[in-house]
Each structure stands twice: as C-alpha cells, then as structure tokens.
Amino acid sequence: MTDRTSFPLVFALWGAGLGAAGQYAKISIIFDRLPQVYPDAGPALGFIVSLVGFVGIVLGVVAGLVVARIRYRRAMLWALWAGAALSLFQATMPSLPLMLLSRGLEGVSHLAIVVAAPTLIAQLSTDRHRGFTLTLWSTFFSVAFTLLVALGLPLVEARGLPALFVAHALWLMAFAVILTVFLRPIEVPPEGRLTLTGIVRDHIAIYRSPRIAAPGAGWMFYTFCFLAILTVLPPYIAPEWRAWVMGAMPLTSIAVSLTLGVYALRFITAVMLVQIGFAACIASLLWLWVMPGLPAACLALAAALGLVQGASFAAGPQLNQSAAHQSQAYGGLAQTGNLGNTLGTPVLLLVLGVAGFPGLVWTCVAVFACGIAAHGWMAARRRADSA
C-alpha cells in the first residue's frame, strides 16, 4: 500500500484497461462486416467474438494465480506488448483459423491486463482514494465501447478494417511504453509454487474463501443480466426515444459509479453498496414491469447497475489485504464475469421467447435477489470466521 495516491499511474493503468476492453469491442463493432472478409465462415464466425470470453471462463482464476507469481508489472507489460503484436497480425486479415488462434491468444493477454491492472491500482492508491480509483477502473468496458463506436467506426469507414486493428495496436504500445518508463515493480512475495497441483489446490481455496470469492460471486449475477438487458430492451422503448435512451444508459452507469457510488463508499462497505445496487435494480425492473420501456425507468436501472459496477471492484481490496489475494479475487471476478456474459444473453433471450417481457423481468429480479443473498451468505461466513 502507499501513503500517497499516484493518480497519473492510475489513469495510465485505466488507459491500458481501455485497450483490454478494446480487444472485445473492436470485433463487436465490426461484426456485421466480417462476413465480407470470411464469406465461407458461417456460424464459426461467432467464435471470433466469443473466444476471448471463453478463455476468461477457463483461465480466469489461473490468470490471477499466475499474475501474482510472475509479478504484476511484468505481467502487465507482457500482456500489452503481446496484445499489440496480435492486433497488428489481425490487421493483415489472416485466414479464419489463424484469426481464431490469434483471438484465443488475445484472451490470455486480456486476462493478464484485467487481473494485474486493478491489483496495481489498489496498491498505488491510499485508503481515502481507493473507492474512486477502482470505480474509475470499473468503467473501462463502457468507456471503451463508447469511444470505439464514436471514433472507431468512422476510422473503418475512412480507412478500412485493418486501420482499426492498427490503431488498437498503437494504443496498447503507447501505454506499454508509458508504464515501462514510469511504473516501478511492486515487490510482493509469491505464494506457493506454480505447478498444476498447486493451481488446482489454489483454485479450490479461492472459491472456498468468503473474502477472495465474494467480488466475483456478486459480479456473476451482474454480468448475467447487464448485456442481456441492453440487448432486449430496445424494442420495448418508443422509437422516438430508443436511440437516446440506449446511448444514455451506459453513460448513466458511469456517471453514477463515479459520483454517488464513490461518495457512498466513504460511509458504507463495498459489499453493502453492491447489495443496495442490486435492490435498486429490482425496484427499477418492477417499475419497467408496470411501465415497459419507460425512459425514466430504463435510466434508473442503469443508475442502479452503476452502483454494483464500481463497488464490485472496490470490494477486492476491502476484503483482501495482500496483493496476491487481491489478484486472485480479480481473477475470480474475470472468470465469473465471462461466465455471466456468456450465459446471460442466450438464457434470457430464451426466457423472453417463452414467457415474454414479464418473464424476463421476473427472471432478472430473481438473479439480482440471488446476488444479494450470495453476498449476505459470504458476509455471514466472514463474521463466523472472525468470531
């Protein structure tokens, strides 16, 4: 820990996080153009998007363990340079098998960044500022998608698909150079040996720990609903309001995270704020159940999701003092988040097809209630352990 927050380095790490989110977003925003590049791909084209998330599901916790052992600065720089090299390779528009291979490797780079960066941010922040800095970190996905839609799509229109991949590579290189020059190593003794048996044993220990596993447990319920809600809501919003509301929802989440969320963390624990956020999500969903597509209710839901977003990342260092345990917690958060993102949209679309909008609402209510209950159960276990 430190007695003074290094804000320039915090923002540099957040910038690197935008590059990590770009590993998802750069494909998502051009997905409709990929059939022109790979006309014979068929359903396999979807793996270009999903492979990064699949790697996160399989290796999320392993990434936390590995990053803790090979050191955070080293893992961060390796991941940035590797990500840049892969993006430059993708700019050549290689054959589909090679593109898929590069996306799988990119998933490893992505995991290293999203585990190392928040751990480093927590170590570079004082107790007073940690709520703000980790809430800032939690916005990296929303901000990156917004920037790539605003700037990336015009670049593709003007210069073609390869230009987007080159621009992404240059972004990662820039932050790799900045962090190489200014980020000093954080000396944390590695815990245990990096063996297959040790990884399996640590994997089990992480999910048995009510401190290390807690941030990821709540995050899974958040991610299960977040993308699905943004996917299925538009048809229920009046056409004249639809584009404005869908554009405003991610920005509302970011704004609430960085204002009300940061302020609340001065007075209550991150876990309690996550639970309050889930409760507010339930209230907003019930409002939407009564008045489907109401813009005010949609924005209220986005605001509630923003509380969960920032507090989930802030819970990592609140519950875990050592950098090694924090990286394990963020590895678990990456794993459960990818699991929620992967399963949430297809499951909720299935519910929507069978039970309509009311069924979707009540399913999301149940998921958020499970999030409250999971955090309550883990909090009870922590109290029992300390008694």
Image (cartoon, rainbow, N blue to C red):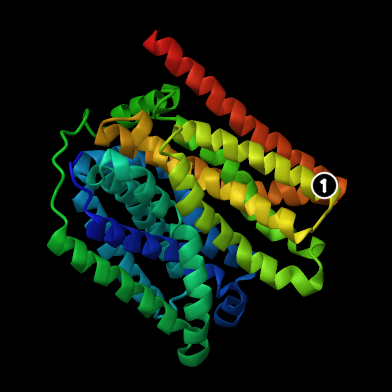
Residue in the foreground of this view, choosing between 303 and 55 = 303
Let me know if residue 39 appears in the view: no
Residue in the foreground of this view, choosing between 73 and 372 = 372
- Say which quarter of the image contains residue 168: bottom left
Residue type at tag 1: Trp
Residue in the foreground of this view, choosing between 98 and 112 = 112
Where residue 369 appears, as percent x and y from the top left, is 66, 32
Position above or below: 123 against 27: above
Classed neighbour count for the residue bearing mark 1: other residues with Cα under 10 Å, few (<14), some (14–19), many (≥20): some
Q: Secondary structure at mark 1?
A: helix
Residue ID at (43%, 18%): 382
Where residue 223 appears, as percent x and y from the top left, is 57, 46
Let me know if residue 32 appears in the view: yes
Where residue 208 appears, as percent x and y from the top left, is 44, 22
Which residue is the site of mark 1?
289
Where residue 286 appears, as percent x and y from the top left, is 78, 43
Position above or below: 293 against 284: below
Residue ID at (47%, 85%): 155
Q: Quadrant of the N terminus?
A: top left
Q: Quadrant of the C terminus?
A: top left
Residue ID at (66%, 50%): 301
Position above or below: 314 against 288: above
Quick one: which residue is furthest to the bottom in this view?
A: 158
Image label count: 1
Residue ID at (40%, 41%): 314
